[in-house]
Image (tube, rainbow, N blue to C red):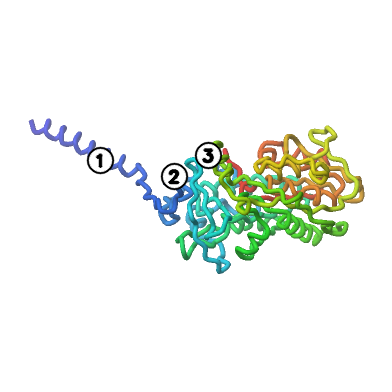
């Protein structure tokens, strides 16, 4: 009988030990600071940095460590990324006033008509995606050492640390995070500096997250200065004149961004003209060139039509997209300057207004959008077009790669 008792006691002890072991393997529930999340939509982007659990390396992160280590950097650990400094403050202190559109939330910046998405707070997913993006690029840099590489980060309202004092929201400095990832690989880096809220209003839109024509001219100038520090370029293009198309009022992408379309249209129809943006552009003399889409000769954009007054004046007609041209295939510009190098420019929609300006300083320019950068064979493009310069420019999303 004693033997049987010992047997059952042993089994019971093993079960207790097994339960304790299982409990130790289950991660603790991460508390969420829902005050950071707009409209109660809690995602990892709104988990307070101090609450993030320690990261466990996964198979998808191993190649990143190998490539980054080749340039003296490893994939940043969770603790290293969390300790990174937040975005620098400009001294501005703004409130965010929620604006509901069909179940989605935008934010009015102070008591102005300028709208924004929720600020870019710390997110592990974004850090991982930016690390993957840097890894992809550094792999290309390693295989093509004779190409000159440049990165230009276009800062937007979500990147500005203007909400710390009045909203207790700390914006994360993703631009500096990415700059640190590529610092040891010989990639030149610069970014669009928004000096203060007044500067943002001067270079951006009320209802759109894109830069306006003044912002585009500054982006072009910054990139020109960065490139010309390493190579001889033709003189910088200056605006010939400013066009406003008879006070063309527009409503931009923010109103329709992930919003119910009927609700967005109703919101637009209730807007006063002064709440809308005025679409203006600068006209430049680019000289003679030919543009192609997937090797088919094609004019990109409706610049001549707009200047001739042939305009759909509906506020939501996608005027920036129409004027500068979209992206349905691989775009190529030929400026017939054989003494100049060939350029590969990868950008999101922020780069479309400046792509012809930048291309005017090169012989052949290949322009890829975000999806093409992520899916096309970049090595093959560099070789096929004898690329001598590669430029990555855009807001944060162009520097992210998802899916391993």
Residue 258 in the image, given as x and y percentages of width and height: 55, 40
Residue 36 in the image, given as x and y percentages of width and height: 44, 53
Q: Nearer the viewer, residue 293 or 114?
A: 114
Earlier sequence position, callout 3 versus callout 2: 2
Residue 270 in the image, given as x and y percentages of width and height: 56, 45
Q: CA distance from mark 3 to mark 2?
A: 19 Å
Q: Does the rendering let one see residue 65?
A: no
Earlier sequence position, callout 1 versus callout 3: 1
Mark 1 sits on what residue? Answer: 17
Residue 24 position by quadrant: top left
* Neighbour tally class for label 2: few under 14, some 14-19, many 20 plus, Cα within 10 Å: few
Indicate which label's residue lies in the foreground, 2 or 1. Answer: 2
Element type at mark 1: helix
Q: CA distance from mark 2 to mark 1?
A: 39 Å
Mark 3 sits on what residue? Answer: 263
Q: Nearer the viewer, residue 226 or 200?
A: 200
Left or right of residue 394: residue 341: right
Residue 185 higher or lower than 256, as above or below: below
């Amino acid at each position: 009988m004693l033997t049987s008792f010992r047997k059952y006691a042993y089994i019971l002890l093993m079960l207790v030990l097994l339960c304790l072991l299982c409990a130790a393997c289950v991660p603790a529930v991460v508390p969420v600071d829902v005050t950071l999340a707009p409209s109660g939509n809690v995602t990892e982007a709104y988990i307070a940095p101090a609450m993030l659990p320690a990261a466990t390396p996964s198979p998808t992160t191993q190649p990143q460590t190998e490539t980054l280590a080749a340039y003296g950097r490893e994939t940043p650990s969770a603790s290293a990324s969390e300790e990174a400094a937040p975005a620098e403050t400009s001294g501005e202190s703004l409130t965010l006033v929620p604006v509901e559109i069909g179940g989605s939330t935008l934010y009015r910046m102070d008591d102005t008509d300028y709208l924004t998405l929720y600020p870019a707070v710390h997110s592990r997913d974004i850090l991982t995606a930016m690390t993957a993006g840097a890894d992809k690029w550094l792999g290309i840099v390693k295989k093509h050492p004779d190409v000159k590489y440049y990165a230009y980060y276009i800062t937007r309202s979500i990147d500005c640390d203007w909400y710390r004092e009045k909203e207790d929201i700390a914006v994360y400095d993703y631009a500096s995070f990415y700059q640190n990832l590529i610092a040891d690989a010989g990639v030149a880096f610069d970014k669009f500096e928004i000096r203060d809220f007044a500067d943002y209003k001067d270079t951006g839109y009320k209802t759109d997250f894109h830069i306006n024509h003044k912002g585009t001219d500054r982006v072009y100038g910054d990139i020109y200065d960065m490139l010309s520090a390493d190579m001889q370029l033709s003189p910088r293009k200056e605006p010939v004149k400013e066009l406003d198309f008879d006070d063309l009022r527009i409503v931009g992408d923010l109103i329709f961004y992930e919003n119910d379309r009927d609700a967005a249209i109703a919101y637009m129809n209730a807007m006063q003209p002064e709440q809308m943006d005025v679409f203006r552009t600068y006209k430049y003399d680019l000289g003679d060139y030919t543009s192609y889409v997937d090797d088919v000769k094609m004019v990109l954009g409706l610049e001549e039509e707009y200047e001739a007054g042939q305009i759909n004046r509906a506020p939501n007609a996608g005027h920036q997209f129409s004027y500068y041209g979209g992206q349905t295939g691989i775009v190529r510009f030929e400026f017939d300057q054989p003494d100049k190098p060939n350029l590969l420019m990868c950008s999101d929609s922020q780069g479309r207004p400046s792509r012809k300006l930048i291309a005017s300083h090169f012989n052949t320019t290949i322009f890829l959008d975000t999806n093409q950068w992520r899916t096309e064979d970049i090595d093959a493009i560099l070789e096929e077009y004898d690329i001598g310069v590669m430029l990555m420019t855009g807001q944060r999303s162009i520097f992210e790669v998802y899916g391993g």
